[in-house]
Image (cartoon, coloured by chain):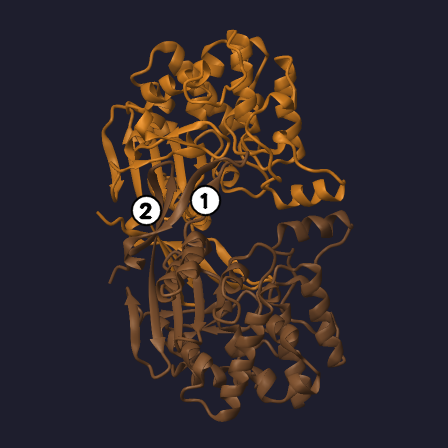
Chain colours: A orange, B brown
Amino acid sequence: MTNPVLVEVLRGAIVESAHRGAVAVFDGDGKPVWEIGDTAKPVFPRSAVKAIQALPLVETGAADAYGFGDRELALACASHSGEPAHVELAQAMLAKAGLDKSALECGAHWPSSHDATIALARAGNSPNPLHNNCSGKHSGFLCTCVHAGIAHQGYVKAGHAFQEMVRDAMQAVTGAAHDANDRAIDGCSIPTYAVPLKSFALGFARMATGRGFGLERAKAAKRLLSACMAEPFLVAGTGKADVALMQAAPGRIFVKTGAEGVYCAALPELGLGIALKCDDGAGRAAEVMIAAVLAKLLGADEALAANLLEQANPPIESRIGAKVGALRPTAALS
Amino acid sequence: MTNPVLVEVLRGAIVESAHRGAVAVFDGDGKPVWEIGDTAKPVFPRSAVKAIQALPLVETGAADAYGFGDRELALACASHSGEPAHVELAQAMLAKAGLDKSALECGAHWPSSHDATIALARAGNSPNPLHNNCSGKHSGFLCTCVHAGIAHQGYVKAGHAFQEMVRDAMQAVTGAAHDANDRAIDGCSIPTYAVPLKSFALGFARMATGRGFGLERAKAAKRLLSACMAEPFLVAGTGKADVALMQAAPGRIFVKTGAEGVYCAALPELGLGIALKCDDGAGRAAEVMIAAVLAKLLGADEALAANLLEQANPPIESRIGAKVGALRPTAALS
């Protein structure tokens, strides 16, 4: 099936570009609450499932052993901007396990924050793996390995004992088999598995509610989502959509973006999980989609819905800062 | 109508994202040679029509008066990367007309070349309007105003005498009316008009062949396209698709990208013009589309077609440089 247009890009009064996508909203019992487009199609969740991938960090006891609080757990679930606070905290997490950045197998890239990139260059420095947007997740992975007595070398590879733990968690939480033929490699070198979009909506409903989980997993899941909602800056960075969305209603909205236009989210008060993907992989469109979906689901809180709708209609500016267009959600999202 | 999927984004063996679009290939008499999708839909050409917008620079005699050769004319048609060679040449063009960067009304932004941005920051500098990817075009605009005795202040605004010259050229070349209700504002503050995609294919077929033009315009058009083909680096920059495509067959392929997934191109030897747009505005997809279309149209030259097809299938790499996916054109483009 062809997914509907969910986001339009306006220049002046004319639609210049358009983005299609699919949206799944499920409760913790697996009941669909709202579905748009083909929610059964397998998609790679990419970084949107980092909170699920962080379950072993809590469940093995590593987080407690190293004294990790909300800040460290938020960073373990982050796609951060490579700002100094992110880099320093990832380094501190590794130090707790007796490691340093040389253990990271994610690769290096310039910070996704433009300002952080300029500052790094002005200081005459170059990026190292701590600046990788996934360094918090990888630091959590490494801490888990060390605490659990798993040799960490090669921890990014499919088949490594640690990645098998992550896969087990992903399968249990989403209820979807993660087979070798669903697998590809993410930008930070770990496996990513394409499974039905709706599995991630169910998974995050379970993460928020604990439905279908044992007591320990339910506790770990809530702890991770709470940590992200308490420290949204550490999950993303200055000016990022995830921060603005979570700050719009502290403790009530969990969101996490993933590459290629994916978003996962959870609304604990409604017991709902959300997963969406923009067909063409555009992050700008996925940001509009998630803001519009949240505005609709949280419509009972009018002030909050207005804030979210404003985020769902961001302006497009010229190089001199004049408003020359905007993005907007289509009627399918309202 | 729904445009077909023209580009797929693979991660491993699985299609992760997909891009739809429309393609128009016309000859200089207005005969359609190849059409995919809705080629009658109005689109903003953005920077893809800079060569047409540069006609007044040649036709008023400004280019000759200031001694502009291929290098200056190529930069006047460019969306450049803000590398030192681009910045210095734009400055030199302005100096010929007795102006400096303070006359530019395009606004400033960090160079689109990441390396140029890092170098600028390392040197402790910040971008000025010369680094704007459109500064060559704007320098050409300003030189035209000064030479033609048009007060240049406000030269970016719809209704300014200079922008009316540009609109006249656009209408004459494309054969499409450019009305006020088709108009919006481009990133560099000048008007941009949404007219049928196929008009741009016809326009570039005329630019390459001179069909339907008077002698002077035919000469000016050929001179501009030849300049771009002779100096592709100045039209774009290090590592840019436009450079690789034009360098694949020097003097035989003219291409120019525009924001929001647009490409215009001309093949003088075949007398053809090409215009395409990716529905969702993705540049990565438009680059694949244009390379695939060129490979098809130039298929008689097997070595060239192989080069172009390689450009139509670029790899996607992880942060450690491992190939983890690729883009590919769909069968609709072959």
Q: Quadrant of residue B78?
A: bottom right
Residue contact between numbered discs 2 and 1, judged by CB atoms under 8 Å:
no
Front one among B58 and B299: B299
Label 2 secondary element = strand
Q: Is residue A201 depicted above or below B89 in this figure? A: above
Q: How many marks?
A: 2
Left or right of B195 on screen, residue A62 = right
Occupied quadrant, residue A263:
top left
Q: To which residue does mark 2 refer?
A: A21
Q: Which residue is mark 1?
A: B315
Residue found at x 64% / y 36%: A83
Give the residue type that dot 1 points to: Pro
Count residues near mark 2 (Cα–Cα under 10 Å), then give few for <14, some for 14-19, many for 20+: many
Identify the residue at horizontal 62%, vertical 40% (top origin).
A110
Amino acid at the residue labelled 2: Gly
Q: Chain of mark 2?
A: A
The one of B309 and A35 positioned closer to us in this rendering: B309
Label 2 vs label 1, nearer the camera: 1
